[in-house]
Image: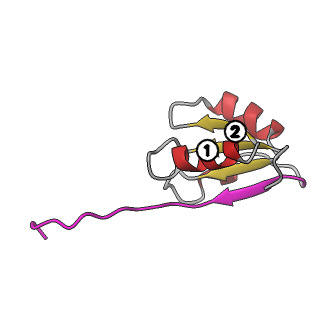
Amino acid sequence: FPSHDMHMLINRSEYVGKPLARILTDLGATVTICNSTTSKKSLDLLISNADCVIWGTGVRNIGYNYSYNDNQFIIDFALHIFYKCDKY
């Protein structure tokens, strides 16, 4: 990722969002973190201004309902952590 770009991260979790935001910030990028409480209107505005949009919500294809331009880099990924449980 070029350090001068504006990155938008939709995930603030301890496992993905915060560490990734820290890495990007350390590389000199401008990072905006959003989450499930961010309004659609705000997301639309932030997405239109971002050079890179990173979806890490765990919801498959959630980012397809937004408008992107040809110069944006879009990443959609999920991380699922399963704990061993004696019930199953």
Residue 60 vs 4, above or below: the answer is: below
The answer to if 6 sits in the magenta stretch is: no
- The stretch of residues the image draws in magenta is 71-88
Residue 68, position in %: x, y? 81, 49
Residue 70, position in %: x, y? 89, 55
In the picture, the quarter occupied by the C terminus is: bottom left
Q: Given contact means CB atoms under 8 Å apart, are the residues at marks 2 and 1 in contact?
A: yes
Q: On the image, numbered disc 1 is attached to which residue?
A: 21
Q: Nearer the viewer, residue 62 or 49?
A: 49
Q: CA distance from mark 2 to mark 1?
A: 6 Å
Residue 17 vs 60, above or below: the answer is: above
Q: Earlier along the polypeptide chain: callout 2 or callout 1? A: 1
The answer to if 77 sits in the magenta stretch is: yes
Q: Nearer the viewer, residue 68 or 35?
A: 35
The answer to whether 4 appears left or right of 58 in the picture is right
The answer to whether 82 appears left or right of 3 in the picture is left
Q: Which mark is residue 31?
A: 2
The extreme bottom residue here reads: 88
The answer to whether 20 appears left or right of 67 in the picture is left
The extreme left residue here reads: 87
Residue 40 vs 21, above or below: the answer is: above
Residue 77, position in %: x, y? 58, 61
Residue located 68% across and 29% down the image: 41
Residue located 76% across and 42% down the image: 28
Q: Nearer the viewer, residue 4 or 74?
A: 4
Mark 1 is on which residue type?
Answer: Ala
Q: Residues within 10 Å of mark 1 (few under 14, many from 20)?
A: many
Q: Does dot 1 land on a helix, a strand or a loop?
A: helix
